[in-house]
Image (cartoon, rainbow, N blue to C red):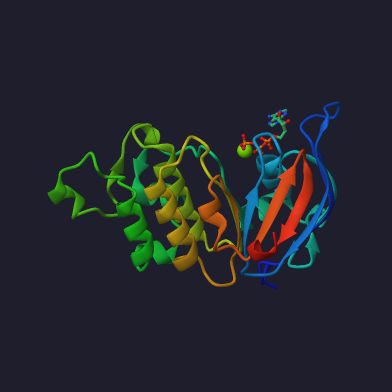
Amino acid sequence: AYWPASGNLRVENLSARYSADGPRVLHEVSFEVKSGEHVGIVGRTGSGKSSLALSLLRLIITEGQVYYDGIQTDSINLDALRSKVTIIPQAPELLSGTLRENLDPFSEFEVLANDKHAMLNDALRASGLFSLQSEEEQSRITLDSQISSGGGNLSVGQRQIIALARAIARQSKLLILDEATSAIDYETDTVIQRSLREAVSKDTTVLTIAHRLQTIMDADKILVLDSGRVAEFGPPAQL
Ligand code: ATP
Ligand code: MG
């Protein structure tokens, strides 16, 4: 059977630490998200937002349970898990090469071959990704356009847009976006949020670690972390 069939996520008493003898950075975090819901995650710096993202992929030491689509992550091969769940980190690394190579390093995605994702192209264009090129060149942006020096000439927000486009192409059922802290500009933020609403499939569950209230006002639920604990979890209107 194809797993995961849905983007259901259930987290039970999840605790985490970075090393065996290190302190806990998450304390018995529990929450449940239904397939297709968009959740905003907020909290002060150091409250454990990025650690939560890493814990969901078991990239740091965890205790407690995480279920995707009803299956406990302990019983899932880590490669399988990490191929199905996408984290867009606060500062994504890019490959030196074409845009296509960055979006689809293993030439897997028909969706890119067909160039169907108008939204994706719009998002990439709107990010100002190619603003170093002349206007005429910009109008001819293709997936074969070159990203120079490993993306070093792109802003962190722009790199996140490329990483997001890759996640959309992979059709991940669970997507975790750790928004760039480095004062992501309003325009980039807007493009990212629009892409998340319009280009991500309806049954994809999206967790956005956000730094602006405005970013999460449209979320179905908001999770507030405080010192590694869930302070609040619910629809924005109820908080
Ligand atoms: P920000 O808004 O600044 O990104 P955050 O909410 O994402 O903050 P985390 O990065 O999850 O916060 O940090 C939670 C705790 O984990 C902090 O006490 C931090 O010092 C600790 N921590 C984060 N990364 C590591 C690491 N690589 N090794 C050890 N401890 C870490
Ligand atoms: Mg963080």
Q: Quadrant of the N terminus?
A: bottom right
Vertical order, 91 against 171 (above or below): above
Does residue 196 appear left or right of residue 205 in this picture? left
Res. 67 visible in picture: no
In this rendered view, identify the residue nearer to me: 180 or 102: 180
How many labels, in total? 0
The x, y position of residue 139, in whole percent, is 18, 55
Q: Position of residue 133 (x, y in %)?
A: 20, 42
Q: Quadrant of ligand 2?
A: top right
Above or below, comparing residue 41 to residue 228 in the picture: below
Can residue 201 be seen at all in this image of the molecule? yes
Q: Which residue: 52% across, 54% down?
A: 215
Whether residue 32 sits left or right of residue 36 in the image: it is right
**What is the residue that sits farthest to the top in this orientation?**
21
Which percent across, then down, holds residue 111? 41, 66
Q: Residue at x 56, y 56 (%)?
A: 216
Judging depth in this view, the residue of 227 and 52 nearest the camera is: 227
